[in-house]
Every structure is written in C-alpha cells, then in structure tokens.
Amino acid sequence: MRLTCCPDRSYLISDSIVYLVIADKSYPRKLAFSYLSELSTEFARSYPPSQSLKPGLRPYAFVKFDTFIQRTKRLYLDPRGAEASGLGGGPASGLEQLNEDLRDVTQIMTKNMEDLLWRGDSLDRMSTMSSSLRDESLKYRKQARQINLDALYRKWAPVGVLGFMFCLVVWWKFCKFSHAFQSDTFGSKS
C-alpha cells in the first residue's frame, strides 16, 4: 500500500488499484487518507483481487460499488463532522466517540432496567391476581360442595322420612302386637 499526497489531491495504491481523491488544500490529509483506506478495504472485501484484476473486464463492472462510495463520501464531506465522528483518528475525536458510545450504552441499560422494573411490577400484579383467583376458587369449591349436599338432602330426605315413618309404624305395630300378645298370654293364667 502506497500513500501519496499533493496539495490538491491524494491517492493510495493497493493491490495494483489506484484510489484517488481530489480535495481543497484546506481538507485534512488524515481524513483524505482515511477515506481512501476505507474505500480500498471495502473494495478488496467486495471484489477480491482475482476478480477485480482480470484482463478484459467489461466497462462499469464495479458500478455497484458506487453506492458505497457515495455513502462514505457523505460522511467525509465536512472535515469537522468527520473528525467529530471519529473518522479523523485524532485523540479528541476518539474520546468524544467513546463518550458518545458510553452515553448510548447508559441509555440502553437505563431502558433495560426500566423494562425489568415494569416486568417486576407486572409479575407482582400477576401474583396478586393468581392468589386472589386461588382464594376465590376455594370459596366456590366449598359453595359447590354445600350445594351438592343440599341437593342430596332434597332428593333423599323424603325417602328417608318415609322410611323412618314406615319403621316407626312397624315398630309401633310390633310393640302393640307384642304387648297384646304378652297380656293375652300372661293375662289368661291369672
């Protein structure tokens, strides 16, 4: 890889491919070379040298790469914006990028903690509701048992009363008959 810089243009040669930037004299060299380096890395990843250096390639064979060039160019258009986003590679821009990343991580962690607390509240409510449901089901089970017993009494109580009355009549007749039998048997001897 060879880097060269002139007052108004910078270029990079990598794998026999020349990457060229023409910019104002005031544009920072570091940013120009960072842009070229990013382009060469992505181009080598997208099109291996065996594919990009074939003799007899058709014109515009790499036109799809233009979208990456345009997107990257937008990032590097403003030198102050590129340095602030960490593309310049200076110590201040790296620190600012690190602080921004830390703020992002802090926001994400705060949101995650809020979600966990909300889920905890939801779980507490669900626990309360399930306890209430369990208590209500026990209450309804006791009421159902009582209703079943009442239905059993209503169904069999008349049969039981009739049976009891039948037994009482039989007993009364038997006692009366046995009392009459005893008085006849014992009464004739006297």
Image: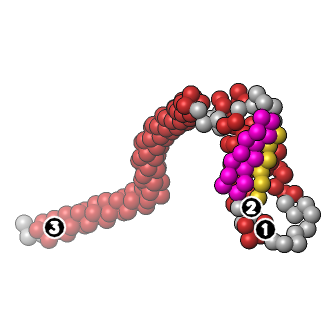
Image quadrant occupied by the N terminus? bottom right
| Quarter of the figure with the C terminus | bottom left
Q: Please, which residue is most extreme toward the right here?
A: 59
Q: CA distance from mark 3 to mark 2?
A: 140 Å
In the image, is 66 to the left or to the right of 104?
right
Q: Identify which residue is drawn at 71% across, 32% down.
A: 28
Front of the two marks 3 and 1? 1
- Secondary element type, mark 2: loop
Residue under label 2 = 16
Instruction: Name the amino acid type tagged 1.
Output: Leu
Tell me residue 163's x, y (percent): 38, 62
Q: Is residue 3 magenta?
A: yes
Asked whether 135 or 94 is in front, the reply is 94
Q: Secondary structure at mark 3?
A: helix
Residue 153 at what x, y percent from top left? 43, 54
As measured in the structure, the alpha-carbon distance from the residue carrying label 3 to the one carrying label 1 is 137 Å
Say which residue label 1 marks: 53
Q: Which region is colored magenta? A: 1-14
- Which residue does the numbered mark 3 point to in the structure image? 182
Residue 178 image offset from top left, x and y in percent: 21, 67
Question: Which of pointers 3 and 1 lies earlier in the amino acid sequence?
Answer: 1
Mark before the other along the chain sequence, 1 or 2 = 2
**Secondary structure of residue under mark 1:** loop
Q: Do callouts 1 and 2 mark residues in contact (Cβ within 8 Å)?
A: yes
> For this view, does 114 lie left or right of residue 58?
left
Q: Residues within 10 Å of mark 2 (few under 14, many from 20)?
A: few
Q: Is residue 149 visible?
A: yes
